[in-house]
Image (cartoon, rainbow, N blue to C red):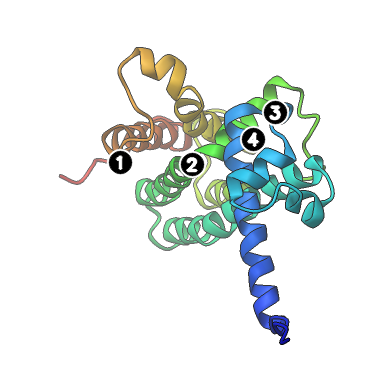
Amino acid sequence: MSTRAPAPPEVRRRDAVASRRAILDAAEQLFAQRGYERASLGEIGRRAGVSAALPAYFFGSKQAVYEAVLERLLLDREKRLEPLAARAAEELERSGRLRPALELLIDGYIDFLREHTTLVRLMGREALGGGRHLAPGPRHSVAVAGGLARFLRSLPPPPGPSVDPEQLLITVVALCFFPIEHNDTMLAAMGLDATGEQFATARKRHVVDVLERVLSGGAAEPRER
């Protein structure tokens, strides 16, 4: 009687990579929807279309799965925003025009958050829970912080008090995060959808307007029509 030959190592590796990705995809959605406490490894496995035991086999514990989900999201954020923030800072350094540089940075940041609402939800849950499940290390976007710091170095000193870079970063995150974080509460009651194209376009324009006035000391550039 013949027996089936084992799969080649490269096939097994490919299957393992696909299974691990499916587990993280399922865990990301489940943690965002239900929170850490109400998600289980077995349900993550079932939602991923793999055996209920496979998440524990790959990661060891629910905490390790959760940390891997957050790590992947934060790495994706920096991978997406680092070149964008650099381009925005280079645009300001090259042209001296603040608004186009802000549009590059803010448009890209808001688009990323719209595409990764699970990150916003997870950070919101962590804020309510005291951040006890978060691993040590930066939780803000280092790329956005670096881009804003380059903006401040490139701009002439404002006529009033200087802009605190840490406060500026907090303001940018708050302006971009809040509508998506409260899409199902405040915005829903207003009949708005923070993930929709129409709202995103208006939000980007508003955030750029606010930041332009802060960084230029109140003198905004005339818009092109």
Disc on res. 126:
3
How busy is the neighbourhood of tag 1: few (under 14 within 10 Å), some, or many (20 plus)? Answer: some
Q: Nearer the viewer, mark 4 or mark 1?
A: 4
- Residue 203 is situated, as x and y percent measured from the top left of the image, at 35, 32
Secondary element under disc 4, as helix, strand or loop, is helix
Q: Quadrant of residue 11?
A: bottom right
Q: Nearer the viewer, mark 2 or mark 4?
A: 4
Closer to the N terminus: mark 3 or mark 4? 4
Dot 4 amino acid type: Phe
Contact flag, marks 1 and 3 (Cβ < 8 Å): no
Q: CA distance from mark 2 to mark 4?
A: 17 Å
Closer to the N terminus: mark 2 or mark 3? 2
Disc on res. 113:
2
Q: CA distance from mark 2 to mark 1?
A: 27 Å
Q: CA distance from mark 3 to mark 4?
A: 11 Å
Q: CA distance from mark 2 to mark 3?
A: 17 Å
Q: Residue at point 58% right, 59% down?
A: 79
Query: Does 162 sit above or below residue 12?
Result: above
Disc on res. 210:
none
Kindly identify which residue carries mark 4. Answer: 31
Closer to the N terminus: mark 4 or mark 1? 4
Dot 1 amino acid type: Glu
Dot 3 amino acid type: Glu
Q: Residue at point 73% right, 86% down?
A: 1
Closer to the N terminus: mark 1 or mark 3? 3
Q: Residue at point 71% right, 31% down?
A: 36
Q: Quadrant of residue 12?
A: bottom right
